[in-house]
Amino acid sequence: MSSEMLSATEHKMLRAVEILERDLQSVRTGRASTSLVERLVVEYYGTPTPLNQLAGINVPEAHQIVIQPWDRGVLTAIEKAIIKSDIGLVPNVDGAVVRLNIPPLTEERRKDLVKQIHKRMEEARVEIRNLRREAADALKKEEHEGTLGADQSRRELEQLQKITDKHVADVDHVGAGKEQEILEV
């Protein structure tokens, strides 16, 4: 029972790291990336729809994103969604496509983005630690009920701590990579 619980906990911790990676992809750096806009929700004929389902998104150059909708009637809805979003970019609509020019980040904005990244990293670490606590409580409960021996419980707790340390290190690695990308001029 406890090894199954450990593998389930490890899977949940891995998901927390994956969610952090996906969240950090949407943080704007000095370069253009389709991940900045592909998850924006656009009001498409009354239905909230992700932008990547309504248009082709590509990066023709390092500081520009081009969004080409498959239905030209949705251009104004895409423009409104970009303006309402928190990415801080102004869309240029030229009749067939939406262009987003990515200006270079100021030093102050870079520092703000690094703070946001550290906040998201800490949230991921807290999630991982909460998963560890829940699993440790379950192990201790099994030991108290007598279904798990004291030595086995101690080994499982040590294994749980190793898993936790590994995933916290993964969070630190992912965050450090994104921080480096933002601070790169």
Image: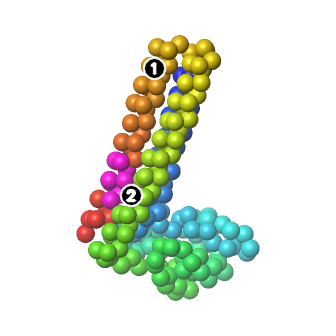
Q: Quadrant of residue 108?
A: bottom left
Dominant SS in magenta: helix
From which residue to which does the magenta span run? Answer: 172-179
Write down the residue under mark 2: 118
Q: Which mark is residue 154?
A: 1
> Is-magenta flag for residue 85?
no
Q: Quadrant of residue 164?
A: top left
- Left or right of 97? Residue 178 is left
In the picture, which quadrant includes the N terminus? top right
Q: Is residue 176 above or below residue 41?
A: above
- Residue at 47% across, 73% down: 87
At mark 2, the secondary structure is helix
- Check the image and name the residue furthest to the bottom: 94
- Left or right of 143? Residue 123 is left
At mark 1, the secondary structure is helix
Q: Where residue 129 appears, x then y in whole percent? A: 47, 41
How far is disc 1 from disc 2 in space, using C-alphas? 33 Å
How many numbered marks, from 0 up? 2
Q: Where residue 14 appears, x then y in whole percent? A: 49, 40
Q: Is residue 111 above or below residue 140?
A: below
Question: What's under tag 1, amino acid-wise?
Answer: Arg
> Does residue 104 show up?
yes
In the picture, which quadrant includes the C terminus? bottom left
- Residue at 41% across, 63% down: 116
- Check the image and name the residue furthest to the left: 185
Q: Nearer the viewer, mark 1 or mark 2?
A: 1
Counting residues from the start of the chain, the first of labels 1 and 2 encountered is 2
> Is-magenta flag for residue 174?
yes
- Looking at the image, which is closer to me, 182 or 159? 159
Q: Where residue 154 appears, x then y in whole percent? A: 45, 20
